[in-house]
Image (tube, rainbow, N blue to C red):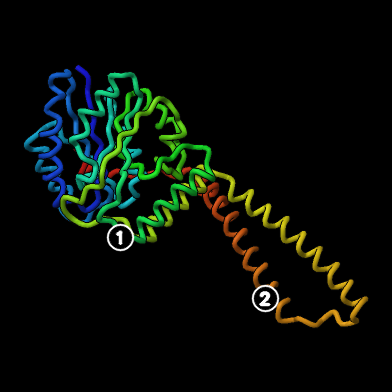
């Protein structure tokens, strides 16, 4: 028989886990007809509530349920990588525990795998229920990524994706520390089918993403899959060098004609402050890339397991 591993990253999802498990079991009844065994792998990302106890309770009832627990919070990217690394099955799917990734789509996703696709990905076509500000900036981020990066990143893309063994092995071959999995999925290529669905409210609990957390995550994505910000900063430097040269000529001509090169100091001070701000901005862009290289060179592990809570 084949095997499907469902990877479920979770942090403080004590309330949602039982609801997720019941819905998953109900929606995967079709697997028996396909001779596919089910394995559910929860990844506890440093939860401080009863998440571990909730998963252990499920494990006591169903031996197909397993848990990898981190020693602290390492982030969802590390949790997904840990799940993919632990999964040795023929098929692997990543899902959130809050049921915003509907398990009811799994049967349709498998139908596309039968057609020869290496992965079946999902994207939200609506953001109903999200704060308007977050929705606005999310759409701007995806548009910006399309312009800056050569890697395909779909608007509204979720981490909810069914993958074949070949696809998972390709993702695991990318061992970088600074991970942006949505970009990695696009970078490895292979035949991918996209499924659209409308936004689903959380089944329980509260989102773990803050606005600034999403901003930082967006910057991770931009710097991980594009060097165009460095090109832009270089072009800005060339532009302001040209402007400075023109201003020097202007001052010399003004002195020769009017004999007063210092008139207009207020506008000059404004220009100096503006150019200084641009310089700091470009230095910040460079700093982001240096910081990424610094973390990669350290070669620290993406996560550490708390073995006493793993089963």
x, y percent for residue 206: 22, 57
Q: Image quarter for residue 159? A: top left
All told, the count of numbered labels is 2
Q: Is residue 69 above or below residue 187?
A: below
Can residue 11 be seen? yes
Q: Which mark is residue 131?
A: 1
Q: Quadrant of the N terminus?
A: top left
Distance from label 1 to label 2 (Cα)? 37 Å
Q: Secondary structure at mark 1?
A: loop
x, y percent for residue 311: 19, 37
Q: Nearer the viewer, residue 87 or 272?
A: 272
Looking at the image, do the residues carrying marks 1 and 2 touch, with CB atoms under 8 Å apart? no
Q: Earlier in the sequence, mark 1 or mark 2?
A: 1
Q: Is residue 200 above or below residue 285?
A: above
Q: Image quarter for residue 49? A: bottom left
Can residue 84 be seen? no
x, y percent for residue 191: 40, 25
> In the displayed image of the protein, which residue is found farthest to the right?
256
Q: Which residue is mark 2?
A: 270
Q: Residue at x 67, y 52 (%)?
A: 234
Q: Residue at x 46, y 37 (%)?
A: 152
């Amino acid at each position: 028989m084949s095997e499907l591993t469902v990877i479920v990253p979770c942090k403080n999802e004590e309330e949602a886990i039982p609801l997720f498990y019941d819905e998953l079991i109900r929606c995967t009844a079709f697997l028996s007809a396909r001779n596919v065994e089910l394995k559910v792998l929860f990844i506890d990302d440093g939860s401080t509530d009863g998440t571990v106890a909730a998963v252990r309770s499920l494990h006591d009832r169903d031996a197909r349920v397993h848990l990898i627990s981190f020693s602290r919070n390492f982030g969802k990217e590390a949790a997904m990588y840990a799940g993919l690394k632990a999964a040795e099955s023929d098929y692997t799917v990543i899902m959130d525990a809050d049921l915003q990734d509907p398990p009811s789509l799994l049967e349709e996703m498998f139908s596309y795998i039968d057609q020869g696709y290496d992965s079946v990905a999902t994207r939200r076509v609506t953001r109903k229920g999200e704060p308007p500000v977050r929705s606005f900036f999310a759409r701007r981020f995806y548009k910006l990524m399309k312009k800056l990066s050569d890697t395909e990143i779909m608007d509204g893309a979720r981490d909810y994706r069914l993958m074949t063994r070949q696809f998972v092995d390709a993702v695991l071959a990318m061992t970088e520390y600074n991970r942006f999995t949505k970009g990695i999925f696009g970078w490895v290529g292979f035949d991918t089918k996209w499924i659209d669905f409308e936004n689903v409210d959380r089944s329980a609990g509260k989102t773990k993403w803050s606005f600034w957390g999403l901003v930082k995550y967006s910057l991770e994505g931009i710097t991980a899959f594009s060097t165009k910000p460095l090109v832009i900063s270089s072009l800005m430097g060339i532009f302001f060098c040209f402007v400075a040269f023109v201003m020097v000529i202007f001052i010399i001509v003004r002195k020769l004609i009017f004999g007063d090169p210092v008139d207009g100091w207020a506008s000059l001070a404004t220009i100096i402050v503006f150019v200084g701000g641009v310089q700091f901005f470009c230095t910040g862009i460079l700093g982001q890339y240096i910081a990424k290289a610094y973390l990669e060179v350290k070669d620290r592990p993406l996560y550490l397991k708390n073995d006493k809570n793993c089963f």
